[in-house]
Image (tube, grey):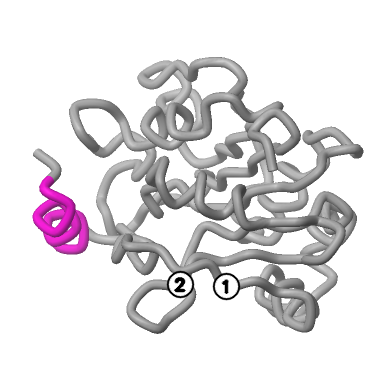
Amino acid sequence: MLRADCVALVTAAGASTRMGSPKALVDWGGRPLVAHQAATLAGFRDVAVVVGAEAERVMTAAPLPAPARYVVHPGWAAGRSSSLEVGARALPDDAGAVLVCAVDQPLTTATVDALLAAFDPAAHDLAQPLAAGRPGHPLLLAGRLLAALRRASAHPTGLRDIVRAARHRALLVPVDDPGVHADLNTPDALRIERVLRREP
């Protein structure tokens, strides 16, 4: 698939309690992590970054390059499913595919491009990167699943239930990227991932 046929949804609304400061603003390669995510998604048709806790601080400190834009979610404390709903509603109905990730799951261009190259929305509902024998993130969903994302809270476990329902038409894409399993929830996790990826 072409980037221009796809949209992306990045969740960045949480309180970052374990990190101690907004994860969207942690330094990643010399720029805020949210800016890194947006830059890695350059060429996408639309990129919705959902912010909630400390939204003004994040938006002021890290302006985003087009096509990325912030979507403010006042009800962010209701949980990630509610953020997925808000972000999905902000995206166009006719997208060919939607890439879903959290701000604390650093993207790489190689992995994003590998997913897009392998994905056929006519044949697949879902694509996930596969590294060291385990699936990871980001998720690439067929555009028709935007409707399910817009009702994520209706599922007991939100996105997990949506992914589970798509398993019969899922594609696992092998990648050389151990970072597909990373979640930068704490300062220690951030330090470890920087070392693994040789980030400054």
Q: Position of residue 8 (x, y in %)?
A: 64, 40
Q: Position of residue 198 (x, y in %)?
A: 11, 48
Residue tagged 2: 130
Amino acid at pointer 1: Leu
What secondary structure is marked by label 1?
Answer: strand
- Is residue 185 located in the magenta-colored stretch of the structure? no
- The residue under the point 66% across, 50% down is 83
Q: Is residue 46 visible?
A: no
Packing grade of label 1 (10 A; few <14, some 14-19, many >=20) is: some
Query: Going by the picture, which residue comes out furthest to the front?
Result: 117
By secondary structure, the bulk of the magenta-drawn segment is best described as helix
Separation of marks 2 and 1 at Cα, in angstroms: 6 Å
Q: Position of residue 189 (x, y in %)?
A: 20, 63
Q: Which mark is residue 172?
A: 1
Q: Is residue 74 above or below residue 168?
A: above
Q: Is residue 178 above or below residue 101?
A: below
Amino acid at pointer 2: Leu
- The residue under the point 25% across, 50% down is 20
The residues colored magenta run 187-198
Left or right: residue 180 compared with residue 75: left
Indicate which disc, 2 or 1, sits on the residue closer to the N terminus: 2
Q: Which mark is residue 188?
A: none
Packing grade of label 2 (10 A; few <14, some 14-19, many >=20) is: many
Q: Are marks 2 and 1 in contact (CB under 8 Å)?
A: yes
Q: Position of residue 70 (x, y in %)?
A: 60, 27
What secondary structure is marked by label 2?
Answer: strand
Image quadrant where one finds the C terminus: top left
